[in-house]
Amino acid sequence: MKSLVFKSLALFVAGIFQIQANAQPAERRISRKEYVSQWVDEAQRQMLEYGVPASITLAQGILESGDGNSPLARYANNHFGIKCHDNWNGETFIQDDDRRDECFRKYNTAGESYRDHSLFLKNRSRYASLFTLDQTDYRGWAKGLKKAGYATNPQYADILIQIIEDNGLNHYDVVNNIAAKKPSVARQEEFNGINQIQHKVKVHDNHIKFIIAKDGDTYYKISKEFELGLWQIYKYNDLSKKDVLQPGDIIYLQPKRNKAQVETHRVQEGDTMHNISQKYGIKLSKLYKLNNITPGTGEPEPGTLLHLKSRKKA
């Protein structure tokens, strides 16, 4: 009888704890609008640094992480479903996917996940063709990701496109919506009295936002006006700290392209590889590579025909 009483009491206490556990509020789910608001700045920063459209990054994050609510996103800060692969030496998170107990990358912060997503696409040859597309061509990017095997779902591209269009994410691919913002009063005070020179943002034939430098400009002033890092101005324009800005210089506000809109350029007196790359909006490293020229070996002679796109095979 005594043991029966203790057994009944134990069952009663266990039932109480179970009721309390069930009564705990579930972890609040993030809405899609909240997710976009939280991560749009990071997506745009990745776009400016690596060239992946912000709309694509956000749509993939939304889809792969369930608006940031999936266990992989919540407990591993992995918003893009990136698996471990052979070159991953960081922490891991195990869960079922296409197969049982698959290995996924685990990050300290979700921001690390965003950066790794950009590097994942940038550093793999199968995605290289995507970076020749216009940065606002989200449809081309979505279809290219599917073709390159980013996901096994045959409707993957269509799903990404629908997410982008339903939520207006393509708006965030336009550099004007990032760079051409008037600094707030607080930001002006932060610049310690630096005069904010207002420039008109233009669009290059190669679909890149740029400005023309004015008298009195410096790289630092331009970076502050458009709320960019000084390193971004240097990187996007193939510059070094020793370079001096001249009035009339083209200054790009986003990365140049891997090819120009025209096939070739005939070198003129005074041309340099750098000013040719600026003129046509093509990355300097790519210009060297297309013409089999080793950087540092001098400037091309006048009359030299430079290729600005990959040469067509005969």
Image (spheres, helix red, strand yellow):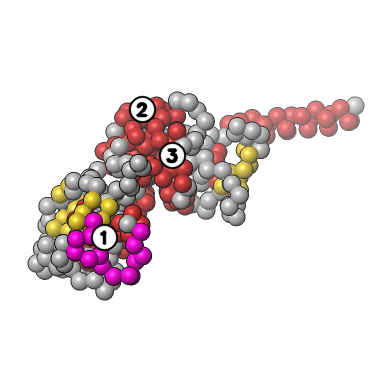
Tell me if I can see residue 90 in this picture: yes
Location of mark 1 (residue): 237
Q: Amino acid at mark 3?
A: Gly
Q: CA distance from mark 2 to mark 3?
A: 14 Å
N-terminal of the pair, mark 2 or mark 1, is: 2
Element type at mark 3: helix
Location of mark 3 (residue): 61
- Residue 67 or residue 131, whichever sits in front: 131
Residue at coordinates 36% horizontally, 42% vertically from top-left? 313
N-terminal of the pair, mark 2 or mark 3, is: 3
Residue 224 x, y percent position in the rendering: 22, 61
Quadrant of residue 163 within the rendered picture: top left
Within 10 Å of disc 1 (Cα), the crowding (few <14, some 14-19, many 20+) is many
- Residue 126 or residue 255, whichever sits in front: 126
Within 10 Å of disc 2 (Cα), the crowding (few <14, some 14-19, many 20+) is few
Quadrant that contains the C terminus: top left
Q: What number is the disc on residue 162?
A: 2
Residue 305 x, y percent position in the rendering: 23, 56
The reply to whether dot 2 and dot 1 touch (C-beta < 8 Å) is no
Q: Is residue 114 shown in magenta?
A: no
Is residue 274 positioned above or below 164 on the image?
below
Residue at coordinates 86% horizontally, 27% vertically from top-left? 4
Q: Is residue 296 shown in magenta?
A: yes
The reply to whether dot 2 and dot 3 touch (C-beta < 8 Å) is no
Residue at coordinates 26% horizontally, 60% vertically from top-left? 237
Q: CA distance from mark 2 to mark 1?
A: 34 Å
Image: magenta residue range:
292-305
Tell me if I can see residue 111 in this picture: no
Q: Amino acid at mark 2?
A: Gln
